[in-house]
Image (cartoon, grey):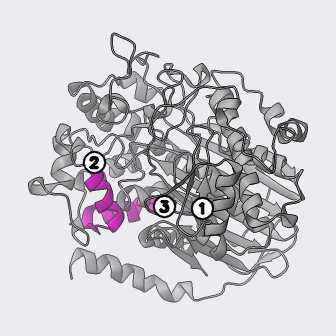
Amino acid sequence: MTATRRTFARCLALLPALLLVAAPAPARDGKALAQAGIATAHPLATAAGQEMLAAGGNAFDAAVAISATLAVVEPFASGLGGGAFWLLHEARSGRQVFVDAREVAPGAATPGMYLDAAGNPVPGSTLTGPLAAGIPGQPAGLVHLAKRYGKLPLGQLLAPAIRHAEEGVAVTRGMVLGLQFRQSAARQSPEFAARFYPGGRPLAEGELLRQPELAATLRRLVRGGFDGYYRGETARLLVDGVRSSGGIWTQDDLAAYRVVEREPVRAVVGGVTVVSAPPPSAGGIALVNTLNMLSGFDRPALDPATRAHLNIEVLRRAFRDRAMLLGDPDFVSIPVARLLSPDYAAGQATTIRLDRATPSDGLAGPGTTVAGGPQTTHFSVIDRAGNRVAGTLSINTFYGAAFMPPGTGVILNNEMDDFVIKPGVANGFALVGTDANAIAPGKRMLSSMAPTFLESPRGVAVLGTPGGSRIISMVLLATLAWIDGAEAPAMVALKRYHHQYQPDVVAFETGAFSDADQAALRTLGHRLEASARPYGNMQVVTWDRATGKVEAASDPRGGGDVTVY
């Protein structure tokens, strides 16, 4: 039997278990969860999570197995060279915590490191090659989750990822798209090119991708825990590979990395408790701020075009605050209480006119110069005890920095692009900022990732998505849909549109607006720009308090998979 057939045989062997409805388990509020649910961006990642739950593990064990498997099967979106945020809910205690495994700037990083002698950005320097890479956080996060919250040993949790790395996985359409996008960049990394462009051509859909060096790195992580990646053989290989190609990492940078547990952003808006990502992500603050602004309007009474106009205007203001005020809370003072305040939102809402768009240039803040596109991944899990995880993982753009240190199988991130390299100069997602998000040694770069819980008398929703700066608008639209009564499949299939303050453009998917709505929005003063292709890959799991029913849904735009059992 071939490796590919063995892989799918294991997945098929799990299917009978997916059809079983387990005995109800008590949740903290006395209700019962008749089922557990998993939604991920790849069937093998979903199967890995289900395998851990079937072995007696909890949602946190499943999260580790899913995260590690996604690093193997979606190498264009996340991996051991990147970072992650996990939002956790412990059912027994009710405790909620945000696990921050975001990358950090190397110790030798400086604010002007990507500028030329004239003070202008060096094209591509934040996107390609080892100088673009921050110190990875995801491996430390996997160890942290397993030790502090899981029930199963790390070796068992990483076994599916190791198996798929050794035996191989089928190349997907998403992999191929990313390889086409990064083909010119691959020339500067022989290891990356040899693995993903054999004979000089990109891998084709359906081919078998084996990653033996990555499997060996995962095995060292199992044997040594934190030290198995951040010290010893893996650390030596990483640093040697980075420095030999112009990077600035040191052994001390790796050894000094630490996972940080933070209090999530929490707010009650219209009877719904929103729990989401705190800084160094802008996701949670922006989500709560936009919902607070919207709460002052009678949305159901508005026609579709005016509702869209209103959503665009609150996003414009939330992204303006993101650009001006947000960064790593360990380095800059952020007025979190003010930004989450309903009074602050009410003040912002007074500047919104329903008959006219507000030009972004009329809101004080930095300008912008360029545009770009996304790559990340997300998963959602609820177990039968009521534990839940929303996990968003990233190496930033397709295949990160397109650089692989020899002997590691690890694709490095290009998250340094998420810093502000110069005020008024946009990053790869057209996001602008100020010195609050300037580069500094050991600093975490600002993110838009927004793993989120929604809680109300109706039930619970666990959601998130990749998509760069568009994450915030996608999560907002899905949240509004859930508040209005939508089920998980409708939330992930919802047509999307986006505004982010600068550039002053409304990007929208085909079908998001009718012709009449487009005309109405243009009349209001909005500049519309149709997206070349659908975007995002949202993963949602919901729990109905009244019935105990769990529902999981994976974005039809992606190649994801769900299980409810």
Q: Which residues are magenta?
A: 155-182
Which residue is identified by label 2? 182
Distance of mark 2 from mark 1, alpha carbons?
Answer: 26 Å
Is disc 1 placed on a helix, strand or loop?
A: loop
Image position of 364 with respect to 511: above or below: above
Amino acid type for the residue under numbered disc 1: Arg
Question: Which numbered disc flags the more N-terminal residue, 2 or 1?
Answer: 2
Q: Are marks 2 and 3 in contact (CB under 8 Å)?
A: no
In the rendered view, does 565 fall on the left or right side of 123? right
Given this view, does label 2 or label 3 mark the residue nearer the observer? 2
Residue 137: percent from left, percent from top? 48, 39
Is disc 2 placed on a helix, strand or loop?
A: loop
Checking the image for residue 65, the label placed there is: 3
Is residue 150 visible in the rendered image? The answer is: no
- Quarter assignment of residue 333: top right
Amino acid type for the residue under numbered disc 3: Ala
Amino acid type for the residue under numbered disc 2: Arg
